[in-house]
Amino acid sequence: MDDARVVHTRPEWFAEPHHGFAWIRMIGALVVIYGHSSPLAGTGDLFPSDWPLQPDEGVLMGFFAMSGFQITESWVRDPHPGRFAAKRVLRLWPPMLTVSFAMALIVGPMITTLSAGDYFAANGTWGYVVNNAGLLTLKHELPGVFVDNPWPNAVNGSLWTLPMELIAYAGLYALLLVGAAKHRYRWVMAVALIGLIAWDRHLEQLPGSESAGSFFSVPVESLVAFLVAFAFGVLLNLYRIPLSPLAAGAGLAVLVLMPNSITGSFWMTFAVSYAVVVAGHFWPSRLTVPGVWVNGSYGVYVWGFPIQQLLAMAGIHNQWLMLICAAPLAYCIGTLSWKFIEEPTLKLRHYFTPAPKKKEPEPVEEDLDEVDEDPEDLDDLDDLEPEEPEAVTPAHEATTKRRPLPRPPAPSPEPPRPGRPGGRPASGPSRPSTPPGGTPRPAGSPADAARPGSGTPRPAGPPSDAPRPNGVDRQRPGTPPSGTRIDGAPRPDGPQRARLNGLPMNGAPLPPAHTRRSAEQRPPRLPAPPPDESVLAKRLSGDLDAGPPPARLPARRPGGRHARPEPPPAPAEETRPVRPYPKRQDGQ
């Protein structure tokens, strides 16, 4: 169990709280055996009566406080009444029924002073089993068992606190059903604690021990005192009271200095309850061991008393010898009880625990440029920006990515400028461009200044530096003839012309795409004036298939948008382009 209120500056120094509580419960169970050693051996009380802090009573207070703290945490994590009750039954009954059946049906017949027939015929034998199964109607005697011990007839005196535990569970269950665990109703538990304190103080003033009577087999005075500790543990959890080792140590120091009085007994309930909860959260990590070695505290508690009675029956009447013999035996049997009884039955809680809800995956804003183009996941692949083209181009041609050329509203006599928008260099080698049927441009011409990667800076100018719209590209020299695409397929004409990235080739509007990337996902781009389309571009796009050769256009002023146009092409045998590099085969 993790508690968000405790933030350790060095978390590696401390064990998990549930492991710390397991250690404290095991130590407390062994302290109970230590406290029972003296009276069961017949040597009187182990602790002087004038001590303000009685270890065995303080341990029981700590047990109830830890129980209230942890049971409340269980409800907060799973506030289901049916599952909550089932978990409590699986925790409380199996070890208690095991030790009761073992003592009544196995050990009792072996050590009773009666014959086996008389023993099993006696009503007390079966009454012991039935009454202990009811828990509230505990019975501590078996016919002819431990009749000659210093503490006669008591088979298992440790069970006397289990009915109080059950009543505490029932009271907390009723309060939780009315909403005491909710933030706005937790004051109900505070009122219940105040009422229990007032009741406990009233019973403390009555003369005589246990003068308030009993509820079934439960003494009322002790019940109320332990319920105060239990309720205080519940409030420590509900109100998220800070847990401070300094405050816990100061409370114990004040308790030691106080005399053994009614006030000291009252203060002990709160000081010890707070201290054990703090100790569970600050347990040293170096003492962390496998859980099987410390989880058997319940078994140690319920088996310790019968083992000590058997040792007293065997003739051990020294309290220290009783402790030395009983503690290891109780620890071994308690560990076996955990391994073969408690742990298997506790695993049954999984049948009452709901399956953990699957966490919904958090929505991730995917960049459509990087999405795998799977037809099963995407509605329209035309709305995705394609990756680099996989078609193999001739070696002498540029290897830039081909993008569609939008048709402007008004044609322009100037040819398109080669290269990619945004100044990205082409993937092929830098070489002077040659228009179809023309002569190569000399190096250092204005057209080369406009080409990226040419080594010559391009003259700055607002129209030239403005970025072009996404999806717009310019034709490079050496493209396939008019009416064909880069992959060799015929180019369709009319409204059904192929498109890419949602941009039409003929200016016709497109329906809205389902998978088009939103404006928030696209990087902002500045708008640019539509490019002018020349006769060369028309021929390449298939819009102009025949006609007289274009007239010579006037030269472009330096700093314009496009490269200088070349003279009209000469006859084919005289317009052979000069290749600066030897011709290579495809794929080289």
Image (cartoon, rainbow, N blue to C red):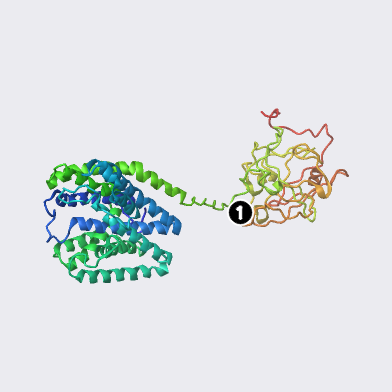
Q: Amino acid at mark 1?
A: Pro
| Numbered disc total | 1
Instruction: Residue 23: give x, y in percent of width and height.
Output: 27, 49
> Does residue 251 appear left or right of residue 84 in this picture?
left
The quarter of the picture where residue 73 lies is: bottom left
Compared to residue 385, the image places residue 574 above or below, namely above
Q: Residue at x 68, y 42 (%)?
A: 401
Frontmost residue, 315 versus 577: 315
The quarter of the picture where residue 579 lies is: top right
| Disc 1 target residue | 523
Instruction: Residue 550: give x, y in percent of width and height.
Output: 84, 46
Give the class, few, some or many, for how many residues have Cα within 10 Å of label 1's Cα (few <14, many ≥20). few
Residue 275: in sight, yes or no? no
Compared to residue 295, the image places residue 202 above or below, namely below
Frontmost residue, 375 versus 394: 375
Instruction: Residue 502: give x, y in percent of width and height.
Output: 72, 51
> Does residue 419 appear left or right of residue 281 in this picture?
right
Considering every residue shown, the one lying at the far right of the view is 547
Quarter of the image with the C terminus is top right
Compared to residue 519, the image places residue 97 above or below, namely above
Instruction: Residue 239: give x, y in percent of width and height.
Output: 35, 65
